[in-house]
Image (cartoon, rainbow, N blue to C red):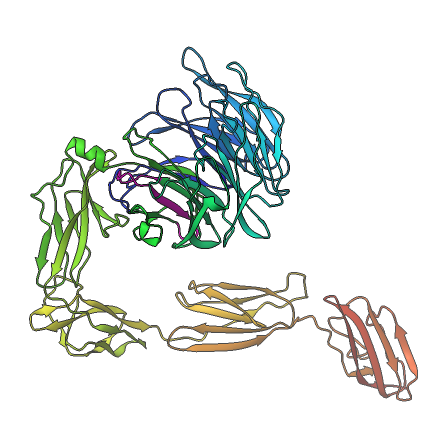
Amino acid sequence: MSFLIRFLGSLLIGYNASAQINASFFPYKDSYHVRGFLSDIAVLNLDKDTKPDVVVSDFANDNITFFYNNGDCPNSLIKGNSLIADDGPVAIDTSDFNQDGRTDFAVLNALSNSVCVYKNHISPAGLVSIIPFGTYAVGDSPKAILTKDMDGDGKDDLLISQSNNGLVYILRNTSTTVSIEFEQAIILPSTLSLETVAVEDLNEDDKLDLIVFGESAGHQLLFFQNQSSPGHISFLPPVVQPIDFSPVVLKLADIDNDGKKEVLAASTDDSRLLLLHNDASPGLVNTSSLGHLLYIETFAGIIDIEVADFNTDQKMDVLALHPTIDSFSVWTNVCISGTWDESIFLSPQKIWAGDNPVALTLTDLNSDGKRDLLNTNQEFRNLVVQYAKDNICASTGMTFPASAANYYSRYNPGEFILTGVGSGLLTWYGDSTLHEIMGSGNQFRTPWLDRTDTFYVTNSTSCCESAPIAVIAAVICSILPPKPVSAYRCGPGTISLEALSNEEIRWYKKFAKDTVVIARGATLTLPYLDRSDTFYVAAVKETCKSQRATVVASIFPVMQVAEVKAETGICSSNGIHAYIPASQKGIRYYLMENETLHSYSGNGTFLSLGNYPIGTPLQVLSANACDSISLNIQYQDSRIPIVPNLVTANSDGTNDDFFIMNLPAPAQLSIYNSWGIQVFSSQNYENNWGAREPSGIYFYELQFEQCGQEENHSGWLQVISNK
């Protein structure tokens, strides 16, 4: 059952098989794709085969998807059909509503403000069909759904918390064996904004009391004592318990084995687990019923919690889900009767839970008598199953053979070959949590080791894996390699490499298996090098040698000037094309356009730099580690008008008219004499003023539009005529 609105992307299922509560609890995983964003998970027996099946709701796509449990290990779940749901399914809970021996379920829909009830029908041939059997309105913004028998008539009723108005809707179950029906909702008023709800018999009167959280005058837990009788549901006014934060999840469990269940609460906004001791007397829930509050620090905020006896010591342990750190934390219960402080739990152990986990529940999927883990995460849209190991392995004799060595040694740093023997698959890990898989098989070659390290190996078949065996790879002689200092130069010539170490330094041409020392000391000088090359250096102390470090000598080509050109021509909307006629292959070119830097790689031939508007200043840099050369270019349109300053109107065929080269059309021209009197004017000048005026100095004004801009040119000219 779920008390949260949860938007998910994938489902992780883990099978508990270890007596220890630690990271090795859920070692195996299967993957099943689930489309959309899962909002809740529920466990139910769809086909009456005694194996728990799984149903998930998809908030984004408004559907319900079923997974059938075949009992295999691995691949225990088979994806079944999907069912169209109402708008925004956010939570699911299950029950045999009509007591026909088949598990039904109800889905809470946040967007349609309703709860839909579905009947599980199994034909004589064993075929499963899910039948919608009623929709009920439950007010604005429903948050959580719960199926519990509140009036003691043997039928589970529906409880829905509603956040907007702080109401609890209770739909009393009036079903028969052939029909599923609920009475009109009983509304339990509250002044609080309800976020989560839980029920439990707090006072041992065989009636389920109601616990809710809300916010009115601060953070509060409200306890409603159940006064119901068969056919009638009622509660006493609530008992209020102030708390420090706003929980998103409530659970109840007998933590101290006194026969009464305590309240556990957690929040995504607070990195503490709250436990409220149950001091209720039989038949009564009042302020004396609420015992000591205990806050226990955790790794991060908690979105969900589950409680179970994981290590079969008859004490209830706690598993919490942390969405921001992608992990669970598990508290092993070591409570001694009469103790109620932080010593009731051992320090929590962290367990990986996948990227952005958001939901959690427990069930025995593989029929081994232990509670297994189902959890979802938002990052991956799949269903992942984690299988048990130790209890299955014990029955099949899966142990790591004694003939496998657990200690290897070598004097100098290097690689190790670790060997094991097993009847199944040997898996080698780099850490004790078994998260970092290094290799598999009867032999495993380690990375280069310059110090002692420990690896872990397990033997497995199917979903059965042995406990890990530690294997030590010991390096007797362990010193750090030198710190290399690479170098470069422009063009062929002498180059020196350096290395730093407090020990003796030796230079080699190969990384490994080369005993030829080409130099000793902190510096390697190469008299002549015409291309880049790689060398290796090691530190030596007596007969102990470090791993070799890499030192690079880089020879860069000498820079050559790059010629940059631009096309000429009349302006256009695409601009003028700039280019490098012959770029150098392997050389990086940088073009600065105003304050924008563009990068180009030389290809040995023509290299286009793009089109730019007339007058754009460009700077081209051709650079490498040796040098850089910059060339500023400013290109203009070759069709700019050229105005003459001399007209000889003597009919000799040369300069007889005022002829303007590259004259745009249309162009306005006005001519004035030295007295400022206009002697010629044209709105569309066509090079037709023949200067039939007396000799002297004249002035012109030329106006035209070019490339979308108005241009104004003025100046003087001399006229020589026969007048």
Residue found at x 17% / y 63%: 450
Residue 657 makes an appearance in the image:
no
The front one of 548 and 250 is: 250
Residue 312 left/right relative to 651: left
The front one of 16 and 430 is: 16
The front one of 683 and 54 is: 54
- Residue 231 point in image, percent of width and height: 56, 23
- Residue 676 point in image, percent of width and height: 90, 86
Residue 139 left/right relative to 334: right
Q: Main secondary structure of the magenta part?
A: loop
The front one of 225 and 633 is: 225
Residue found at x 22% / y 34%: 391
- Residue 581 point in image, percent of width and height: 49, 67
Give the residues drawn in magenta, as a range.
Answer: 308-326
- Residue 15 point in image, percent of width and height: 31, 36
Q: Is residue 199 above or below residue 645?
A: above
Residue 658 left/right relative to 104: right
Residue 644 makes an appearance in the image:
yes
